[in-house]
Image (cartoon, grey):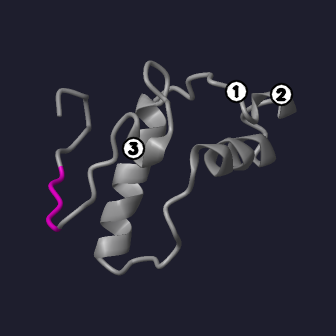
Amino acid sequence: SGLRGGAVHLVQGGYEYCHYMQDRFDDDGWGCMYRSYQTVLSWFRLQHYTSLPIQTHEEIQRMLVKMGDKPDKFIGSKQWIGA
């Protein structure tokens, strides 16, 4: 992995590629990590590790506020969430 003590792991299985402007939602220029998270979550769904629906941008924002990572004003914003 290039990281001391790190390891590379591969996974198999299908996933749904989530991308900008999907579902008629304009997240161009700020939604990359939201879409990456949705793509990873789709892999867990398709491997039957979870049956939870893929969260919307607002649901992801609400989750981040609830866990204390973001302030209340973050909900409904077009701010990046980082990686």
Q: Amino acid at mark 2?
A: Lys
Q: Secondary structure at mark 3?
A: helix
Q: Main secondary structure of the magenta part?
A: loop
**Residue at the disc numbered 1:** 77
Tag count: 3
Residue topped by disc 3: 22
- Return the residue found at the far top: 29
The circle on residue 73 is 2
Of 16 and 9, nearer the camera is 16
**Residue drawn at the location 66% of the way across and 51% of the way down:** 59
Question: Type of residue at label 1?
Answer: Ser
Mark 2 or 3, nearer chain start: 3
Q: Is residue 20 left or right of residue 66?
A: left
- The residues bearing labels 2 and 3 have C-alpha atoms spaced at a distance of 24 Å
Q: Position of residue 61 (x, y in %)?
A: 68, 41
What span is colored magenta in the figure? 9-13
Q: Earlier in the sequence, mark 3 or mark 1?
A: 3
* C-alpha gap between disc 3 and disc 1: 18 Å
Dot 3 amino acid type:
Gln
Which one is closest to the eye, mark 2 or mark 3?
Answer: 3
